[in-house]
């Protein structure tokens, strides 16, 4: 059971816009930045979005992030076959027993 | 460019120990926080531990607290994870990652596989 909740799967056709949600609480998303990672099959994760909505150099502007309250979203526009991957959200959690980094359970994106 | 090379993984029996290393290059290692994150086969990402740039602040996930120890050697641009009392559920690929762009890990190495099995 992950602290951050993501849908286990999402899908879309090439060219479509897909959104992946990430739900948390006041101790994590509600008070800290959200990061998003992409993991292509058989590879290490790669940073897609940092500080809620910032793209690292080299990440296409088809990828965008947003945050509202205790939820965040990753949007992928102009879907491509190479976007088929697992996507994870993450944030610090300021729990009483010590800060932790918490991840969502991951969303497997299928491009139909 | 940023490079992270993890090593030290392998097969170990339950109750055994392993020491993972991460050699970093392409950035000023001593300036940045570092984390270990793991991924069990077919599962999602799980954060393991964090260490500040000087090593003065350290955090652990509850699942490894008291068994794992994170450390760093800024002179050698290296990060370590001493893993004791290993359990089957510690079986995973272990990644090291710096926090270059802010609060959370950003660049990832290729990882090193730890298998705990009798």
Image (spheres, rainbow, N blue to C red):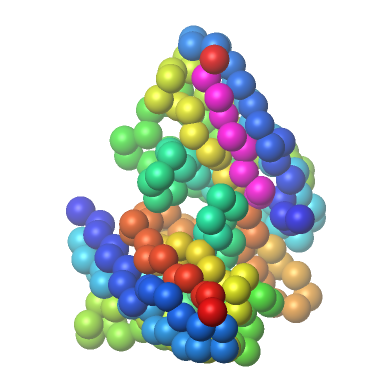
Q: Is residue A43 above or below residue B14?
A: above
Q: Is A89 in front, or is B44?
A: B44
Q: Position of residue A33 (x, y in %)?
A: 60, 52
- The quarter of the image holding the C terminus of chain A is top right
Residue A110 in the image: state x and y as whole percent.
55, 24
* Residue A72 in view in this figure: yes
Image position, residue B79 (x, y; %): 35, 78
Q: Is residue B58 above or below residue B6?
A: below
Q: Which is nearer the eye, B42 or A32? A: B42
Classified by dominant secondary structure, the portion drawn in magenta counts as strand
Indicate the quadrant where residue B80 lies.
bottom left
- Where's residue B62, x and y in %? 68, 77
Image: magenta residue range: A104-111
From the viewer's perspective, tell me whether residue A52 is left or right of residue B101: right
At horizontal 44% and vertical 48% (from top left) the residue drawn is A45
Residue drawn where x is 38% and y is 73% of the image:
B9
A28 left or right of A14 in image: right
In the picture, measured across the screen, residue B106 lies left or right of residue B44, that is left
Label total for image: 0
Magenta stretch: residue A32 in it? no
Residue at 59% from the left image edge and 52% from the top image edge = B43
| Rendered position, B95 above or below A83 | below
Left or right: A26, with A15 as reference point = right
Viewer can see residue B55: no
**Of residues A43 and B23, the one drawn nearer to the viewer in this rendering:** A43
Residue extending furthest toward the front: B118
């Amino acid at each position: 059971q992950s602290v951050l909740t993501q849908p286990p799967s999402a899908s879309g056709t090439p060219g479509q816009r897909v959104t992946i949600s990430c739900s948390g609480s006041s101790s994590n998303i509600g008070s800290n930045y959200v990061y998003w990672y992409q993991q292509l099959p058989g590879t290490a994760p790669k940073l897609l979005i940092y500080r809620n909505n910032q793209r690292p150099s080299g990440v296409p502007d088809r990828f965008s992030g947003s945050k509202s309250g205790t939820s965040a979203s990753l949007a992928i526009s102009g879907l491509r076959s190479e976007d088929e991957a697992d996507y994870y959200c993450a944030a610090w959690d300021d729990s009483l027993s010590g800060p932790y980094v918490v991840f969502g359970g991951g969303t497997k994106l299928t491009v139909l | 460019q940023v490079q992270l090379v993890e090593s030290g993984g392998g097969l170990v029996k339950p109750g055994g120990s392993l020491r993972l290393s991460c050699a970093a290059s392409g950035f000023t290692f001593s300036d940045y926080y570092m984390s270990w994150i793991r991924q069990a086969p077919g599962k999602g990402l799980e954060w393991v531990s964090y260490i500040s740039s000087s090593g003065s602040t350290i955090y652990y996930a509850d699942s490894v607290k008291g068994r794992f120890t994170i450390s760093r050697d800024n002179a050698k641009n290296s990060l370590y994870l001493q893993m004791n009392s290993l359990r089957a559920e510690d079986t995973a690929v272990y990644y090291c990652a710096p926090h270059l762009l802010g609060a959370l890990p950003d660049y990832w190495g290729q990882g090193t596989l730890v298998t705990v099995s009798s």
